[in-house]
């Protein structure tokens, strides 16, 4: 019960920004458990849990609808807009979708909740955003924003004012609906105590 392996499938944003403290706490409690993390898009994460390649899946959207999986909501998150230091949007009192639609945009690949939710909100407002680049992780998005390619839309947790001092962020929670990150297991699987513990953490 106190030793073995635990394989987690998750997306880059979860692995990079959400899981480090959880993994650290888990490893301190379970030193004899070998932890492995596989990165992928939400569909790949769900498939890895469904076919038994991973014990747990942590992602947004896709794992909720995959047949054969049981998923539980972990937490809600929303987005921020990242910009170069002297971008004109920083002077605006309240950011709107119409303002964003005037600029080239960089956001998550549409296989991810972050990207698909962004498109849905623009569609609902009758706007056609000029999306010049999509990526699977926030670090790539921030890199191209810094290069001046466009305005980035990323998960708010992926922006750190100290680490990302070359950029500025504007909260976009009022523009986009919150997304829910979920943890999924395969229905009928036997879960060891340490797997339950990871889920609880």
Image: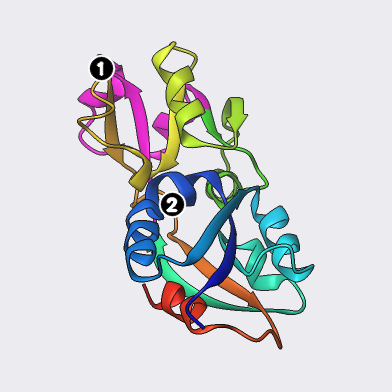
Residue 176 is tagged as 2
Magenta residues span 77-105
Mark-to-mark CA distance, 2 and 1: 23 Å
Residue 44: percent from the left, percent from the top?
Answer: 72, 54
101, above or below 97, in the image: above
Q: Position of residue 9 (x, y in %)?
A: 61, 57
Answer yes or no: is residue 78 visible. no
Q: Secondary structure at mark 2?
A: loop
The residue at which mark 1 appears reads as 85
Residue at the spot 53% in from the left edge and 44% down from the top edge: 12
The answer to whether residue 139 is above or below residue 120 is above
The residue drawn where x is 44% and y is 39% is: 154
Q: Locate residue 128: give its quadrant.
A: top right
The percent position of residue 118, horizontal first and vertical second, equals 53, 45
For the C terminus, which image quadrant?
bottom left
Tell which circle, 2 or 1, labels the residue nearer the N-terminal end.
1
Q: Is mark 2 in CB contact (under 8 Å) with mark 1?
A: no
Residue 40 falls within the magenta-colored stretch: no
Q: Is residue 78 left or right of residue 182?
A: left
Pointer 1 local density, CA inside 10 Å: few below 14, some 14–19, many at least 20: few
């Amino acid at each position: 019960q106190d030793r073995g392996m635990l394989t987690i499938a998750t997306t880059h944003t979860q692995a990079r920004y959400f899981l480090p403290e959880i993994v650290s706490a888990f490893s301190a409690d379970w030193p004899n458990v070998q932890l492995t993390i596989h990165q992928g898009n939400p569909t790949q994460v769900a498939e890895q849990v469904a076919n038994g390649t991973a014990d747990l899946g942590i992602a947004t959207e896709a794992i909720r609808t995959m047949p054969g999986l049981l998923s539980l909501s972990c937490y809600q998150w929303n987005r921020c807009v990242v910009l170069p230091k002297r971008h004109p949007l920083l002077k605006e009192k309240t950011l709107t979708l119409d303002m964003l639609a005037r600029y080239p945009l960089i956001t998550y690949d549409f296989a991810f909740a972050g990207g698909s939710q962004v498109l849905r909100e623009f569609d609902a407002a009758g706007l056609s955003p000029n999306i010049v680049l999509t990526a699977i992780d926030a670090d790539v998005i921030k890199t191209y924003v810094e290069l001046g390619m466009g305005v980035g839309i990323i998960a708010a947790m992926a922006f750190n004012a100290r680490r990302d001092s070359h950029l500025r962020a504007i909260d976009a929670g009022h523009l986009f609906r919150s997304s829910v990150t979920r943890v999924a297991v395969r229905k009928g699987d036997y879960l060891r105590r340490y797997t339950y513990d990871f889920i609880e953490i």
